[in-house]
Image (cartoon, rainbow, N blue to C red):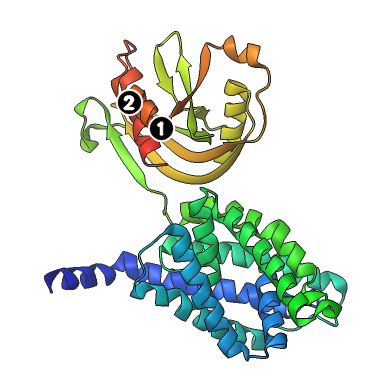
Amino acid sequence: MTNFLNKTKVYLTVPYIKRYFLYIFGIYLLGAGVALIYQTFFGAAAWDALHYNFYVGIPLAFKYIYPISSAILVIIAYLIEWKKPGIQMIVPILLSLIFGSVVDFLVIYIPSVKEAFFLWDVLFLAVAVTLIGIGLNIIRYCNFSLPAIDQFCLAIARKFKLTFGQGKFIGEVIAMMGAVVVGLFFGTQGEFFYLGFTTIFFILFLGAIIDFFRNPVFRIFKGIPNIDIFADDLKEADIINSKSEVATSAVIENEGKIMVLYIEDRDFYVLPGGNKFEKKSLEKSLKKVVLEDTGYKINIHEEQLIINEYFMDSSYETHYFKAKLRSKPVNIESIKSKGFNIIWIEKNELLDLLNNHDTKDKFGPQIMWREFLGIINTI
C-alpha cells in the first residue's frame, strides 16, 4: 500500500501534471494532422487505406475495425520487443479510440479543400506532416503510451536499433503492402486499393520529418538527460563560470563496433566530435568535425545525453548523439597527419579501455571518464 501511495504522489507532482497537459496537446496535434489529410483530395495514408480495404471487403464498421487492428498491432509490438504481456497493453488501444474521436471532432472545424486550388491541398498535406512529426515527438517526450500504430512502429525501431522515424517508414511500407494484399483479395484494384498521393508522400517524408523534429522538441522541453561532472573535487559553489564551451560527440556504431580516436601525442582515447561552430546547429557542427577528423560522412540520429563538466574557471557542455556512417572515408592521409588513429572496437572492450588506460596526459583521465559516461548512457 505504501508503494502504491508513493507512486501516486509522484504522478501528481508538477512535472507529471505538466506532462499530462503536453501529452494531450501532442494528441491534438497528431489528430489535427490526420484531420487535415482527410480534407484533401490526395487520398488516404497507408494505414487508413488498409483499414478501408477491410471495411469494403468484409464489410465491417470502422468502429470495430480500428479496435481490432489496434489490438493486433499492440500484440505484435509486444512480441517484437519480447515484452511480458500486461494490463498496460490496453492503453494504446484505448488511446487509439480516443484519438479517433479527436480526429472526428477536428474534422468538423477544419475546412475541406478538395474542390479548391491544387496548392491548398499541398499546403494542407505539408502542414499535416509537420503537425504529426511534432505531435509524435511531444508524446514520446512525455514517455507515455503512443497510439497502437505508432507503438508498433516504435517497437520495430527499438528491435532493429533504428530511429523512430525509420521505424515509422517501415511501418508505412508494411501498411501499403498490406493494403495491396487485402485489396487483391477483396478486388479493390479498380480503386487503386484506396492508396493515393498521400500514401507515397507519407512513406517518403513522414519518417524524416519525425526524426527532424525529435531533437529540437526534446531540447525545448528539457527532455535530454544531463550529467554533471565536477573536476578536482570542486563543489557547485566554488565554480566561476567565466568561460563556457559547447561541444558535440558522436557515438558511431557500425557492424557491432564503435568508432574511437586515439590521440597519439597525448596518449588518450576520445569519441569523434569537437566544439560547436558559432553559426551552425549542433548536428551540422558535429557532421563537419567528424568529416574533418575522420574522413567519414555520418547521419546523426537522436541526441541522448548532455554532460556538463565544471572546472574552477570554465565549464564545458558536451552533447552526445547516436550516429551511423553514410559513406566510406575520404582523405585518409590528411587525417593521419593530424595524429588521429581511428579504431573500431566493441562496446565492452571500449568501456574497459576508457576505464583502465593509464594515460600520462593531465586531462586524459577526465576526458576518458566523460566519454565512458557518454557511451554507457547513449547505447
Q: Does residue 353 appear in this view?
A: yes
**Residue 205 left/right relative to 140:** right
**Hey, what amino acid is under mark 2?**
Asp
Query: Is residue 350 placed above or below 211 in the rendered structure?
Result: above
Quadrant location, the C terminus: top left
Report which quarter residue 313 is drawn in. top left
The label shown at residue 347 is 1
User: Badge 1: how crowded within 10 Å, few (<14), some, or many (20+)?
Assistant: some
Mark carried by residue 92:
none
Return the residue at label 2: 352
- Picture coordinates of residue 78, whole percent (x, y): 44, 65
Picture quadrant where residue 143 is located: bottom left
Q: Which residue does the image show at 72% across and 57% down from the upper left?
A: 204
The residue closer to the viewer here, 281 or 183, is: 183
Depicted 204 relative to depicted 118: above or below: above
Q: Give percent across and percent down for residue 371.
A: 38, 30
Please, what is the three-letter code of the amino acid marked with disc 1? Answer: Lys
Q: Nearer the viewer, residue 313 or 112?
A: 112
**Helix, strand or loop at mark 1:** helix
Q: CA distance from mark 2 to mark 1?
A: 9 Å
Image height of 216 relative to 254, above or below: below
Residue 105 in view of the camera: no
Q: Residue furthest left?
A: 2
